Image (cartoon, rainbow, N blue to C red):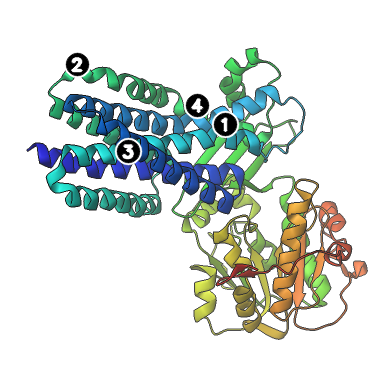
Amino acid sequence: MKNIFVIIIATLTSFTSLFYYLMISGQLSELTGEETIAQSLSLGLYLTGMALGSGLCDKMLSIMYDRNHKWKLLIQAEMFVATIGSSLFLIGPLCLAFYLVYVNQYLFSPYDIPLPLIFQIYVPMIFGLGFFSGIQLPILLHLNHEEESQILFLNYLGALFAGVLLNVFLAMGQSTQELLIFVLLLNFFTLFLLMILQRKFALSKYFTMPLLSLLLILNWLPKIEKAELLSYYLGFKIQSLKQLGDWSRVLGQYANLERHVSPYQKIDIVTEPPQIESYFHGNVSLFLNRKPQFDLYSHKTYHQSMVAGSINLNNQIPKKILVLGAGDGILAHELLKHKEVESILMVELDPAMIEISRRHRVLSSLNGGVLELEDPRLKIVINDAISFLRTDKEKYDGIYIDFPYPYSNELKKLYSLEFYQMISAHTNKDGFFIFDFPLESEIQESRHNKMTGCLLNTLKKAGFAHPFGFGPYSSFVFVSKSDIQRSFNYSTLPEKLDLSSSLNLVSLEHVLKRERKGNCYYSLFYGRD
């Protein structure tokens, strides 16, 4: 019976440890926006900690002859793993709380938490998780010599289950907080099994720290999570430590947060109260995976200038249109205003985005209800853009691409050489495609310049040597197969075009022609060269 318990514990310890590691790595990627750096650093620290923990534990076990001491060390290691796991609930909000209190000036963007602070907190967490996880396996092997191979097999199997089940649970729409609570409960179950093996329930003191953490988390997590997100989105500042106690209450009065978690993304809608009585909605902002999309003040600048700018540069209204992304429906609404448009095929990956845009009062008013009304010119397909392009045989007069910026490896495939080659194959001879891209930014300017250089090299390799950039407020790249020199004809702009949209129709050719070092480009197979 004891051997069975040891085998179960070997599986659970590896499962919970790797699950926590994957959650920490994902949280670090989300906070920093540097997916490659975050994952590489996390893996290196975790493995280094495991190696050091295993090495030190092996030396300790060689001089530790009392089995009770070995069990006690194993319980202590599991307790520290549970404590590190429970701290994941609070560490992100606490990073931001520190930032809000001590950074009283806009030294950083409201959407840009200081990276050194984040890494200083997460580095010891990841290393500690690896260290205490590394202690556990040698102890289990020492305690059960006759079944070492079986313990090793199940230990690795537990790690495999953690990697697979995390993606399965997330695909089912489970939140990271729910998953963390589930794994933390597994930690408690593991500690309980260890105490059964010891037959000493006096060791219940080892429950104290993780159990206290769990109780505090369950009580404060919803408030802390809401306050952290609203502070992040609104750039809220705390001028003194005294104000920290009123943080959640003040933000609750100031704005409302509506969060939707889908298998593909986290959709946040922030509603601010009216600033003046005549403005009925106040302000409503949409965020996807913590990245700003648009609000009531900027949506016209983005969507109107994208449509009006592309039509003006093309000198004619496209009849057959493909829209990739833009699940909010506002872009389709702007295109359908033109009677010359005969058909629009909209391909959206996330059905949750479509459903939210249909039923949300403000979003449905912005898209004119096009997602709910049966306009024969609009067809919606739920599919991945690349998968759709690989199977679709049609060609289009205009292709409108509305994707998040390529801040992660997953998103870079939507800006890759192969993707633009597929776009070219689906574009008519006199057709065009247009997409948004951060051509100019005062924040992280060098990073955006590098991204722009990689993008231009990618387009050039795909056969588009003369892209046209425009939009000082919301920037776009217009691309066509012809080598005609493009420029705006302001005399033909629609009379009802919003002023902010008109002001956004300004060439950024000087940005595209800026000299840049390096020959990097985006590719599905080679990454960035």
Residue 228, labelled with which disc?
1
Specify few, some or many for label 1: CA neighbours under 10 Å numbering under 14, 14-19, or 20 or more.
many
Q: Residue furthest bottom?
A: 429
Q: Is residue 75 visible?
A: yes
Kind of residue sitting beneath label 3 = Val
Tell me which residue sits at (63%, 79%) in the image.
Answer: 421
Residue at label 2? 202
Going from N to C along the chain, the mark reached first, 4 or 3, is: 3
Going from N to C along the chain, the mark reached first, 4 or 2, is: 2
Do the residues bearing badges 1 and 4 touch, measured as CB atoms within 8 Å?
A: no
Specify few, some or many for label 4: CA neighbours under 10 Å numbering under 14, 14-19, or 20 or more.
few
Whole-percent x and y of residue 76?
Answer: 30, 26
SS class, disc 2: helix
Do the residues bearing badges 2 and 3 touch, measured as CB atoms within 8 Å?
A: no
Q: Is residue 9 left or right of residue 365?
A: left
Specify few, some or many for label 2: CA neighbours under 10 Å numbering under 14, 14-19, or 20 or more.
few
Instruction: Kindly report the distance in space between the C-alpha atoms of the residues bearing marks 3 and 1.
Output: 23 Å
Q: Quadrant of the C terminus?
A: bottom right
Of marks 2 and 3, the one in the foreground? 2
Whole-percent x and y of residue 304?
Answer: 75, 59
Tell me which residue sits at (37%, 45%) in the image.
Answer: 18
Residue 183, labelled with which disc?
3
Q: Quadrant of residue 79?
A: top left
Tell me which residue sits at (85%, 53%) in the image.
Answer: 499
Q: Residue furthest left?
A: 1
Q: Residue furthest top?
A: 242
Going from N to C along the chain, the mark reached first, 3 or 1, is: 3
